[in-house]
Amino acid sequence: MAKFSRILEEKARQLAEDSNNRQWDTSIPAAIRRQIALTVEQSRRQRELHERQLRRLLRIECYVDTDLMQLEQRIPRYTPCHFPEKEKFKKRLFEIEKERRNLTLRLEEKNQSLEDRLLNLLDKHQQLDI
C-alpha cells in the first residue's frame, strides 16, 4: 500500500472511530462519517478476502506442484519430453498463475475505487466540518 493510501485510510479510520463513539447524529458531517466508516470496513474486508483467495491459490499450486514432482520421479528417464500428464500439470500451474494475476488486478481496481470514494468523502467532511 502506498504511503498516501495509508495516510488516507488512517485519517478515515480515526474519523470512523470518532463516529462510533457518538450517538446517532442526523447531521450531514455525521452521515459522511458513517459513509467513511462503511468504506473503511469494505476496504478491510476486501483485503481479507483477497488474502484468503491468494492463500487458497497457493495451497492448490502446492498440491499441483507436489503431484508434478512425484510424477517426474516416476517417469522413466528416456521418455518423450512432452509427457501428457506432465504437460497437464504444467498447464494447471500456468492457469493458477493467470488466476493470481487476474485476482490481483481486480483487487487493485476495487481498491482504487474505494480509495477514490474515501478521498471524496474525507474532502466533503473537511469542507463541512470547518
Image (cartoon, rainbow, N blue to C red):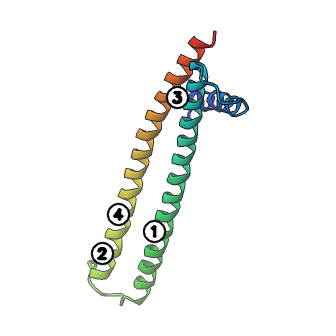
Q: Amino acid at mark 2?
A: Glu
Which label sits in the foreground, 1 or 3? 3
* Category of crowding for the residue at label 1, using alpha-carbon neighbours closer than 10 angstroms: few (below 14), some (14–19), many (at least 20): some
- Label 1 secondary element: helix
* Category of crowding for the residue at label 3, using alpha-carbon neighbours closer than 10 angstroms: few (below 14), some (14–19), many (at least 20): many
Label 2 vs label 1: CA separation? 15 Å
- Label 4 secondary element: helix
Whichever of labels 2 and 3 marks the residue nearer the N terminus, that label is 2
Q: What residue is disc 2 on?
A: 87
Q: What residue is disc 1 on?
A: 61
Q: What residue is disc 3 on?
A: 118
Label 2 vs label 3: CA separation? 46 Å
Residue 71 appears at what percent x and percent y? 40, 84
> In the rendered image, which quarter is residue 112 located in?
top left
Which label sits in the foreground, 4 or 3? 3
Whichever of labels 1 and 3 marks the residue nearer the N terminus, that label is 1
Q: What residue is disc 4 on?
A: 94
| Residue at 37% in and 51% down | 102
- Visible residue check, residue 23: yes
Label 4 vs label 1: CA separation? 10 Å
| Residue at 52% in and 28% down | 118
Q: Nearer the viewer, residue 36 or 8?
A: 36
Residue 88 appears at what percent x and percent y? 30, 75
Q: Amino acid at mark 1?
A: Glu
* Category of crowding for the residue at label 4, using alpha-carbon neighbours closer than 10 angstroms: few (below 14), some (14–19), many (at least 20): few
Label 1 vs label 3: CA separation? 35 Å
**From the viewer's perspective, is 37 left or right of 21?**
left
